[in-house]
Image (cartoon, helix red, strand yellow):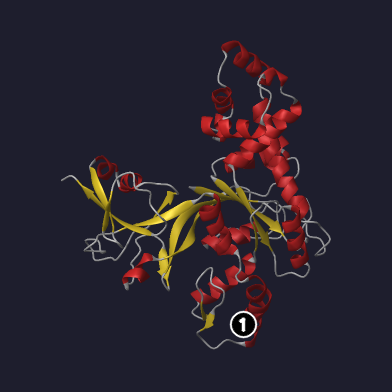
Amino acid sequence: MLIGVVGKPSTGKSTFFKAITLAEVEIANYPFTTIKPNHAVGYVRVDCADKDFDTQCNPRLGYCLEHKRFVPVDLLDVAGLVPGASEGAGMGNAFLDDLNQADALIHVIDLSGSTNEKGEAVSAGSYDPIKDVLFLDEELDLWYLRILNKGWDRFARQVKQEHAKLEKAIAKQMSGLRVTEDIANEALRSLALPEAIEQWSAGDLRRLASTLRTLTKPMIIAANKADIAGATGNLARLHAQFPDRVIIPCSAESELALKGAAKKGLISYVPGNTDFKEIEKLNDAQKNALGFIQKNIFEKFGSTGVQKALDAVVFDVLKYIVIFPGGVNKLEDKEGNVLPDCFLLKGGSTALDFAFRLHTDIGNNFIRAIDVRTKRTVGKEHVLKNRDVIEIVVRK
């Protein structure tokens, strides 16, 4: 799984990326700070299974704080997009091609309206962030449409002459954008296009491109700079304009500051929590900075939103679940590490899917699985639930 972080320049996108990954990326308030995509690891947060067994886990990958397990996820920070990106503006084609690797997108916008369409700094509230949501939708749709249109007349004639299945033909035409036959079929069903492909209008093609983009690149909106004056009003307008979108108010700078203070041992902070605890005596500047975060972020929005955004795209949009391998009589591995592993699987995965996820040999030699909490034996078709702890029994 790969999550792409995208948006126009200077919205705080690279700050967001650094806050969620703590990767060393260049951060500056001018367009195209990021040219080559930054690739790093972030962590989704789940309630760790260790608490249910009255123990403390020892993760092999990721980490666990106060029984909150942080599971690694790959992220990609793509250089800022500008109007005309689908036609190559601002190196747009290269940036869009980078995005094609992603399974889902986090669109970082400047909720305060202090960055214009070119990524230039303007007075807070003078730019409408709704335009940024519409802009990215437009550029991504045009990107898909450009590929769909490539040789369309010849493509349509071939489909008619060969009596090819539409979903198969479209999947082949759009394979570079990871459109499968199932996805093409879902898009065609939802649009109810004319049966004769040669009768499709330019508008029909545009709607098809948009639907394919939505299905292959699901997206949430991280409304960054939520702590700046005027941002709250813009948030209400965004929800009204896009009632079906996942929109999460964020302050990437606040998340970065909290993680920095925690790293120095000044505070105790678990990413995604609704507060933090002071450990060391703070000076006046530190107190003021943390007090600002408490008042303008936690009291208004409940969290910085950064962790919530990543969790939302993985669990709510892509519908992943986490599964812990374990044994009924022993939760430790041979080195004595408790529940050392935690795997992300697509929702609806079965016990056999999990066995193959662990290792091909385990899947091939699967006999049964055991739900470690209930000690109930289950078969290979058993559908797993989020946070299940599963033991796999194999042929020797």
What is the secondary structure assignment of the residue under circle 1? helix
Question: What residue occupies the far top of the structure in this picture?
Answer: 161
> Residue 70 lies in what quarter of the image?
bottom left
164 or 209, nearer to the observer: 164
Tell me: 386 left or right of 180.
left
Q: Residue 98: where, in percent of width, then height?
A: 58, 42
Q: Is residue 262 above or below residue 12?
A: below
Tell me: 68 left or right of 251.
left
> Residue 326 lies in what quarter of the image?
bottom left
Residue at image coords 59%, 49%: 105
The residue beneath circle 1 is 286
Q: Is residue 71 above or below residue 297?
A: above
Q: Residue 242: where, in percent of width, then height?
A: 72, 52
> Residue 298 lies in what quarter of the image?
bottom right
281 or 152, nearer to the observer: 152
Tell me: 28 left or right of 377.
right
Q: Residue 342: where, in percent of width, then height?
A: 37, 58
Q: Residue 89: where, in percent of width, then height?
A: 73, 40
Residue at image coords 41%, 68%: 64
Tell me: 360 left or right of 3.
left
Total marks placed: 1
149 or 299, nearer to the observer: 299
Q: Residues within 10 Å of mark 1 (few under 14, many from 20)?
A: few
Residue at image coords 70%, 51%: 8
Q: Is residue 31 above or below residue 112?
A: above
Residue at image coords 40%, 59%: 387
| Amino acid type of the residue that numbered disc 1 sits on in the rendered structure | Gln
